[in-house]
Image: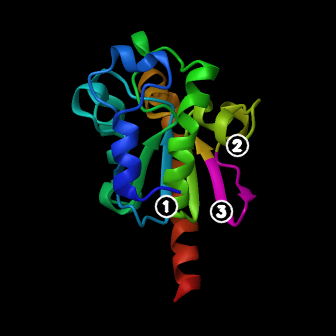
Amino acid sequence: MLSWDELRTECLACRKCGLCEGRTNVVFGCGNPDADVLFIGEGPGRDEDLQGIPFVGRAGRLLDDMLLAVGFDREDVYIANIVKCRPPQNRDPLPEEREACLAWLRNQVALIRPKIIVCLGRIAAGVILHEDYRISQEHGQWIDRAGVRMTAVYHPAALLRNPNLKGAAMADFIKIKQEADALASKEK
């Protein structure tokens, strides 16, 4: 396992797949490296590629609003993606691209040691939780793996496309905050 500085340095120089050819910036991750809650998306979009920070576009602003609405601050959690470079035209990352990046994410998880992992959308859930994950049927359900509570929620971009899903998404975020608070109170 690499240290944070080693991991960031190596990740920023990564050329393991073709996504490196079109990137402006590697989108490593952001937030509290000691966070209890880790949010994982699928990959950076245009705004994220330009700024080098995950979830800073319209979907990111919605994510921030949802976090604040339930009592999280962006600086209290850590946010990362399955792939660290933007897929062309925001397409889904290909299996070989996801595989090339997974070691970075695994190292991030090992360093953070979160108590809760939240997958943002079906792509992240399919990689982290199980391959045939159905976000419309399984969102908000908890899975315990290696002492970590895991769940998935609708991706904020999906909520922008279909605002009717926002109620279910907010209910999931409320449950995530309740779970985080319950785990924190057990530590005291």
* Mark nearer the N terminus (2 vs 3): 2
Amino acid found under the numbered disc labelled 1:
Leu
Task: Give 188 or 104, whichever is nearer the viewer.
Answer: 104
Residue to which mark 1 is pinned: 111
Amino acid found under the numbered disc labelled 3:
Val
Residue to which mark 2 is pinned: 129
- Spot occupied by residue 7 in the image (x, y as percentages of width and height): 41, 49
* Helix, strand or loop under label 3: strand
- From mark 2 to mark 1, how far is it between C-alphas? 20 Å
Amino acid found under the numbered disc labelled 2:
Leu
Q: Quadrant of residue 84?
A: top left
Q: In the drawing, does residue 134 fall left or right of residue 44?
A: right
- From mark 1 to mark 3, how far is it between C-alphas? 14 Å
Camera sees residue 107? yes
* Numbered range of the magenta stretch: 140-151
Q: In the drawing, does residue 64 fall left or right of residue 81?
A: left
* Mark nearer the N terminus (2 vs 1): 1
The answer to whether residue 149 is magenta is yes
- Spot occupied by residue 183 in the image (x, y as percentages of width and height): 58, 75
Camera sees residue 154? no
Residue to which mark 3 is pinned: 148
Please name the residue shown 51% across and 29% down the image: 164
Above or below 87: residue 75: below
